[in-house]
Amino acid sequence: MNILLGLAPFIVFFVLMRLVSPLAGLVAAFAVAVLLGVQQWRRGLQIKILEIGTLLLFGALVLYTLIAAPHWSVATVRLVVDSGLFAIGLASLLIGIPFTLQYAREQVPREYWDSPLFFITNQRITGAWTAAFAVMAAADAAAEYVEAIPVWIDIAVTVAAFVTALWFTRWYSALVRRRAETAAASSG
């Protein structure tokens, strides 16, 4: 499973939150997170840090919304969700298991998994995603607390941060792969 599939609950949330309601977005995102977890479990695969964090985040937000019945504005609910996504990325770095590491292991041969380069590459890629999540949360906060900033700017910044993290992931992975192949060819 690639990282985009791991982020599917967030994508579902953002679409349904805007088209239906914040609660519909939260419930649908939680359902998608459950389905992804069950799919991984049924395949006998390890459930990833991002998936566990996503499940806990949306589960807690659904419960909170049903119990406390807050009035979520678009910017407020996005701020909470993006802050949760940032917390997942940061926590994975702090515990020494960058969340991209588990996705990379699905695409990279096992012989490279213990390489310091493999780990550092995933730290940097996870750092880029975590920085993107921080930018998204900051844009949400600005849209919520600065009246002069319209929601469309928040959305544009979110899309730009997401696309930049995705681009960096692909670019940096390819760069590291090219350098490793060049080093192997010159030493062999």
Image (cartoon, grey):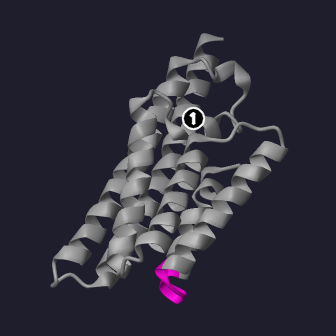
- Magenta segment includes 20: yes
* Along the viewing direction, whichever of 115 and 53 lies nearer the viewer: 53
Question: Residue 137: where, in percent of width, then height?
Answer: 32, 62
- Residue at 69% of width from left, 33% of height from top? 108
From where the camera sits, is residue 64 visible? yes
Residue drawn at (52%, 67%) of the image: 62
Place residue 85 in its image quadrant: bottom left
Residue extending farthest bottom: 19
The residue most toward the right is: 43
Residue 113 at what x, y percent from top left? 63, 23
- In-front residue for pair 109/91: 91
At label 1, the amino acid type is: Leu
Location of the C terminus by quadrant is: top right
Vertical side of 33 occupied by 153: above or below = below
The residue that mark 1 highlights is 101
The residue depicted at 58 percent of the width and 46 percent of the height is 52
> How many marks overall?
1
Secondary structure found at label 1? helix
Residue 45 is inside the magenta segment: no
Nearest to the observer: residue 62 or residue 178: 62
Residue 41 image offset from top left, x and y in percent: 78, 43
Dominant SS in magenta: helix
Chain part drawn in magenta: 17-22
113 to 99, vertically: above or below? above
Q: Residue at x 25, y 76 (%)?
A: 143
- Compared across the picture, whether 75 is left or right of 186 comes to left
